[in-house]
Image (tube, helix red, strand yellow):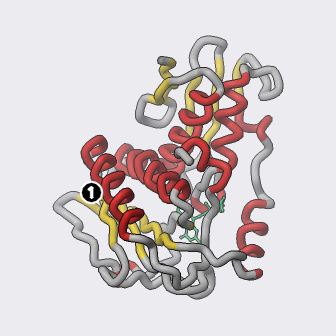
Amino acid sequence: MNITEALPKRFSCRAFDTREVEAEKLDLLRSEVERANAESGLHLQLFGPGEGRLDLSKKMFAGEAPCYLAFVGEDTPVGKERAGYFGERVVLSATALGLGTCWVAGTFDRKTVVAEVGEGEVLHDVIPFGYAPAKQPLKQRTIRAGIRSRDRKPSSYLEGIASYDEAPAWIRAGIDAVIAGPSAVNGQPVTFTWDGTTLTATLRTHKLKLEETDLGIAKLHFELAAAAAGQPGSWQWGDGAAYVTA
Ligand SMILES: Cc1cc2nc3c(=O)[nH]c(=O)nc-3n(C[C@H](O)[C@H](O)[C@H](O)COP(=O)(O)O)c2cc1C
């Protein structure tokens, strides 16, 4: 499975079982982390079994997370956006390897995280990962269903000269992949504008201070799905930036 095929399989996994993550899978993820750091200037760090504890809120999570990623980087809007874009690439790689993941910015104890945080850097988020139980416990399924019931409709995602239904197939595919993606408290803060030539992505709110991370995640999801629908390209960085077709 590649990361595009992993898009519909990913969900926020809030329960983990005790099955160990194989060393080969950890090695593959470590090389994904290295690649992400080299391309982004971020300081993502991976902690394998026994390499550091992560104290997740018992209100949201069941079971100890066997491993986690710590997303450290510069404390700027683009630093957060890059954490979202490159972090989600690692998340989808983990999904493709059959592992469960969850972005966590709030419901964990920051003091338990042993990540290296350099001058001018902050710990943005953590991502616990490991094997999910065969079935997520009822409580975790209820949490997800509750949050997901607030999903925005596809038609609300597109502004400009065309409605969602009239838009080119690659724009609709991109939006569908953005809706399927994670965002903090499922805020789904990104809106797209299409003028017939250029597509831009804009944040409609900045309430949580996590929206730039959501924007980076949304841009990756969009790119993967639009490429699969025949319109490869890449987003420029920033709020209001354009999709540059290849
Ligand atoms: C930047 C970011 C921060 C998040 N922080 C938390 C968190 O602190 N606790 C939590 O349980 N889920 C957290 N989530 C997961 C979202 O609640 C989840 O992505 C959203 O509800 C959509 O559900 P899904 O990922 O299962 O599709 C976060 C997601 C993102 C992208």
Residue 202 at x, y percent in the picture? 56, 35
Q: Decide: is 226 above or below 213.
A: above
Residue 60 at x, y percent in the picture? 62, 80
Q: Residue furthest right?
A: 165
Horizontal side of residue 72 vs 56, given as left or right: left
Q: Amino acid at mark 1?
A: His
Residue 170 at x, y percent in the picture? 67, 25
Horizontal side of residue 203 vs 179, given as left or right: left
Residue closer to the observer: 19 or 73: 19
Q: Residue at x 74, y 73 (%)?
A: 141
Q: Can you tell which quarter of the image residue 111 is in? A: bottom left
Horizontal side of residue 106 vs 45, given as left or right: right
Residue closer to the observer: 184 or 30: 30
Q: Quadrant of ligand 1?
A: bottom right
Q: Which residue is mark 1?
A: 43
Q: Decide: is 171 above or below 95.
A: above
